[in-house]
Image (spheres, rainbow, N blue to C red):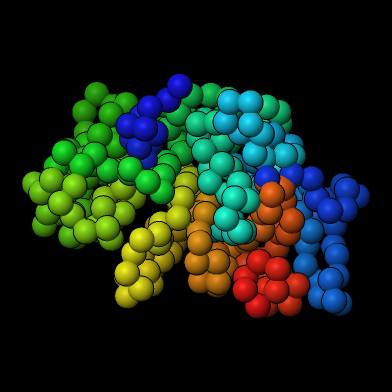
Amino acid sequence: MTSTSESSIGASTRSESETETDTESEKISPDNKSVSQASRPDRAEESLLSVRNLDAGYGDLQILTDVDMDVGSSEYVTIVGPNGAGKSTVMKSVFGLTAHMGGTVMFDNADITGRRPEEIIREGIGYVPQNENVFSTLSVRENLEMGAYILDSVPDDALEAVFNRFPILRERQDQKAGTMSGGQQQMLAMGRALMLEPELLLLDEPSAGLAPDLVDDMFDRIDGINRDGTAVLMVEQNAKEALQRCDRGYVLANGENRYMDDGDVLLNDEQVRQDFLGG
């Protein structure tokens, strides 16, 4: 079983209509609105990350059922849905932290299904969990250096790039991580995940626990990471803000895919808003 510290370093789903098409997801029109129902979009050839028919959970408890998901190169994708929908389990499953029960996870045309987190890190995926995402007794700089633990030495250019992106980390590099504010710790966790310059960054609830005036700043920083070429797959409680900023979104409920479309389409669909976004 992977330890919390190990996961930090790298840092439910059959659709309501089971009709499949060869090239795109099935279209449904609740209340005459057009939103893509997440069936099985044929995006695998163009996807950086391709999840197909994923069944996963913890021990014998299955949380995800038949989940499909894609993230393209440099794409920004958000997963939203109610509490208990299985959103975080998707992230953990991609990163090798759950019991794999079926389906496949492909990354950059390599099968990473069921592989260990340290192997997945080497493939080019960074992960920032929601909780316990910094080493509180280590300094900021030591936390960042841990992000490059699979290398023989810490690359100076990677460290400098993180300091340039998050200047507060340079200023506080000798400070113990546990004494930093919640927002600063979140920056540190993201910075550590960026030390190996991943192609894909997994972010689990990055705005959780942040003061309202810090939420927009955090989202702006994530936007910047994506603009610089890193693909982002994010689970976020602030669904409306996340859908406004992302390229595409997935809606999960009860461990299953419910909807998939461009973020603004989901955000403005009456049925999705009523069922999942609080009207």
Q: Position of residue 90 (x, y in %)?
A: 58, 42
Residue plotted at (59% across, 64% down): 247
The reply to whether residue 218 is in sight is yes
Question: Which image quarter: residue 78?
Answer: bottom right
**Residue 170 vs residue 157: left or right?**
left
Query: Is 59 rendered above or below residue 28?
Result: above
Q: Position of residue 182 (x, y in %)?
A: 27, 58
Q: Nearer the viewer, residue 208 or 79?
A: 208
Q: Nearer the viewer, residue 214 or 278?
A: 278
Query: Is 145 rendered above or below residue 177?
Result: above
The reply to whether residue 52 is in sight is no
Q: Where is the C terminus found, in terms of image quarters?
A: bottom right
**Residue 86 vs residue 216: left or right?**
right
Q: Position of residue 191 (x, y in %)?
A: 29, 49
Residue plotted at (43% across, 32% down): 121
**Residue 116 vs residue 106: left or right?**
left
Query: Is 34 rendered above or below residue 204?
Result: below
> Which residue sits furthest right?
19
Q: Position of residue 3 (x, y in %)?
A: 38, 27
Q: Nearer the viewer, residue 24 or 2?
A: 2
Residue plotted at (18% across, 54% down): 180
Residue plotted at (46% across, 50% down): 204
Q: Where is the N terminus found, in terms of image quarters?
A: top left
